[in-house]
Amino acid sequence: MKFIPYKKIVFLLIDIARPNHSFTMQKSLFLSFTFLLTSWMLFPQKKPLDHSVYDSWKSLTGTTISRDGKITCVLVSPQEGDTTLLIKDNGMNRTLHVERVINYALSPDGRWTVGLIGAPYAIRRHARIEKKKANEKPEDSLLIIDNLAFEMKKIPGAKSYKTAKEFDSHVAYTLIPSKDTTSKNNAKQREILILRNMLTQQEDTFRNAKEYIFNKSESSFAVAIQPDKKDSVNQTCVVFINLKDHTKKIVSHEKTEYKSLAFDESGRQLVYLTTGDTSKMVQKVYDLRYYVVGADSAVILADRNASGLPKGWVFNEYAAPSFSKDGKRILLGAAPAKAPKDSTLVDFEMAGLDIWHWREPLTPPQQLVELKKEESRTYRGIVCPEHMNRYIPLATVEMPYVSVGDEGNGQFALLWSDKPYQLESQWDISSRQDVWIKDLQTDSLYELGRPLPGRPALSPGGSFTFWWDAGEQQWFAFNNRSRLIQNLTKNIPVNFWNEKQDTPSPVESYGIATWGEDDEYVLINDAFDIWKVDPTGKKKPENITRHAGRTDSITFRYVNTDTEKQSIKTGELMLLSAFDTAGKKKGYYTLAQKGNNPLRKRTLEKFNFTGLEKAKDADIFVFQKSNFNTSPDLYITRDYWKTAQKLTDINPQMHDYNWGTAELFSWTSFAGIPLQGILYKPEDFDPLKKYPVMIYFYEKHSDELYRWFTPAPSRSTINIPFFVSRGYIVFTPDIHYTVGQPGRDAYNAIVAGAEALAQNSWVDKENMAIQGQSWGGYQVAYLVTQTNMFKAAGAGAPVSNMTSAYGGIRWDSGRSRQFQYEQTQSRIGSTMNDSLQLYIENSPLFFANKVETPLLIMHNDKDGAVPWYQGIELFMTLRRLGKPAWLLQYNNEAHNLVHRRNSKDLSIRLQQFFDHYLKGDPAPVWMTQGVPTVLKGKTWGYEFDR
């Protein structure tokens, strides 16, 4: 508890005791002093956040709810430490906490919770420090909880587990076998697999299990047994188990390799790949085995001699068979056989190089990134169980992508290829595809577009192919039966293109909400409302939200609470998310598909709603709710938000710290554009004081007014609660962009906003700073060449020289960066050859001589988005000019920091840097002297240089 300093008390007492005060005034002052003193005693000052608090700050993940809504589970995770599983019995108001749960599964009926318990964090950390081998590390345990009575069973030594998607009584888990020193069998054994019936406690043990699988509804189980070659005891086989009567059957037992087990939904059909190829070739050849309940054993359904399989093609290890929804089709990949490796070539005598060809569709960096995907690429086709050794090819090398309608059951398949346009994708992100429709009943192929100006998709039932045409700014649908194209939106008097899009790229849409059952209609979003459109064009479009969104400036979007649901049924009550674009409030509405007042507000609050889950068979929802000064917690509502019960309180320590408030701030940019941003003030804000200001920006932030920020180590940007808690005002302005002058647009918005903010008496306009990362880092670097109004600046991963960055590579994807300048975020809008001056004018590097602001740069040597030499170019230029600049280069780190140890380090340096310049704190050694490489890893330079 913090009291008024002693000297201040004495001063006030002396002032009260002055003889020229009247008795009444003395009494009033005394009472005021007494109230002040009492207030300080009863309401002590809250602590500021510091770097020691991060690890214990918790978050919620993995929320699930049973079908009837009676059981809710969620993981409560500290940033560093042991995760806790919380199980809430909503019917009986019981709660169970289980420590150290890594992951879990809740049975749909709510009866069982199964999970994996890890060793305590401290023990795992110690094992890392001691560099323990895998077999020496602390073991995990299987957790089984009967939620009827919260009875718990732990099985030590478990390594992994698996359940059916809709499990009700079985779990399969693996154990690490103990070493048998008495056995003469020298074969290497795999993990032991145990199939457990949680109701009866009965267990079946399988040794040398390579792969195992349940069907969706837990009626069947299959396991592939693959002993070591030296094992003379155990048999290679595939075992099928009927979980209803617990009968077992070996359906294959050849001495071969089995993989890629797959059930149909009913569990009556099983397929898998097999190969007897023991050669060490580049590619093994597989066949497809098929078993159906009642058969004596599995049969070869398709092999390399299957009719319809293109000449020279095979089924390889990536064939990945799967069933259609109704189980009548097996979708299977095939590919051209790879040529055997030339054994006469000697690796150390071969040149190692990549050849870049000007006409090749993809550059070598992109090919290298996509190499594994291309090496495993197969082309999907169909095998039907009733047609032995017959393959129906769908995708081809020329048409590599395929989608079959109605979850694989449909009459039509959509095929497409972007290959002819890959070279142009270096600079043009327009979605162009060559598109075909294949009728699987007639085996006919129809060319829909070459190219089609958009990325096509099939309607859930497969009757229509639809796409967004950015050039026409309209939605289109192609009737796969009648082969007629319908413009879906041309007669609707609103725009369906994103009116706020501010990049010179093909204009995007607001998206498709969903489809009606049997493809009867499609629901299409505009900026605010949802339209019901007949894809045949026979019925007039209908605004099903009754224009309420546009009238009230609320954006409605359909929320699908069942991931397996492909469409909505007639009469179904729809859940809509709602965003008040003016007040920034969020919430939910429901929409009935009939009635005079179908749209009904359920909740619209000054909060953010995330993690929504619905009970499948009840109108019960669980969700997280938060805003800037309210930590996210889990809530449950049984009456569509009339009431909501809070289920967790994960961060009670928040109330011990000086937090903050968030409010909108408005101003006009230098270009005359009205803008908004968010102003974060300390909880103990005093309008009579002056506060230093941190300004963080990227593009637009005002819609995030009610966003929660967890106190956490920085991956690249300032942590807003941290700085606000320590006495800063933080400002996050929106930026309005045009084309060709991103730097000037940033200046017009941010500097105008800073000047408007500085008009307030509580702003210390002499101590304002800016910070940003990536695109924000570029804008920071640009601004310090245009103004000296900021006391300090931090730029993370900044592009400093657009003329060199334009020809660079985004190493994570291997893609050229040219599209970024011509069409997307960098917003130049033309090639460098055509508009060189724009590239120069928007490059901070060429104006570095104007920089007077101390600049802290972070750019990491494994940055896959912005080439890290961009940070080096800027630093070296500033260094040559004698400008105060620092470059933080985290080793083997990405665009945003991945490793927590580095994030903690950056957080300390950001605070020290800005506290020095904006608060006058002493500068640390790393700022005054640096840290020489010979001292790297021995000292970090945090100490103050006095």
Image (cartoon, rainbow, N blue to C red):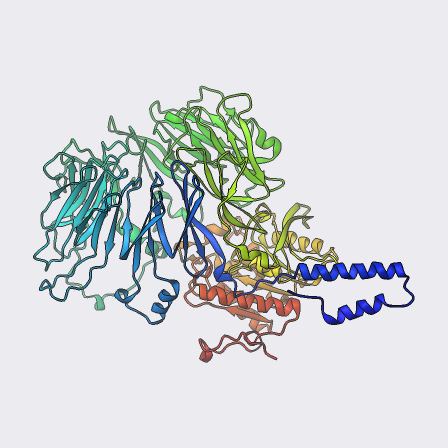
- Report the residue at 39% width, 26% height from top: 517
**Percent position (x, y) of residue 609?**
52, 43
- Report the residue at 74% width, 55% height from top: 759
Q: Is residue 386 above or below residue 690?
A: above
- Residue with the most extreme top position: 538
Q: Is residue 539 above or below residue 710?
A: above
Q: Is residue 316 above or below residue 302?
A: below
Q: Looking at the image, can residue 713 be seen?
A: no
Q: Nearer the viewer, residue 395 or 225?
A: 225
**Percent position (x, y) of residue 856?**
56, 67
**Percent position (x, y) of residue 561?**
43, 37
- Report the residue at 61% width, 33% height from top: 552
**Percent position (x, y) of residue 899?**
43, 63
The quarter of the displayed image where residue 891 is located = bottom left
Quadrant that contains the C terminus = bottom right
Q: Along the horizontal axis of the image, is 356 left or right of 822?
A: left
Q: Along the horizontal axis of the image, is 383 left or right of 899?
A: left
Q: Looking at the image, can residue 719 be seen?
A: yes
- Residue with the most extreme left position: 232
Q: Is residue 239 above or below residue 616?
A: below
Query: How many tags in the picture?
Result: 0
Quadrant that contains the N terminus = bottom right
The quarter of the displayed image where residue 330 is located = top left
Q: Along the horizontal axis of the image, is 307 left or right of 651?
A: left
Q: Nearer the viewer, residue 753 or 162?
A: 162
Q: Nearer the viewer, residue 97 or 391?
A: 97
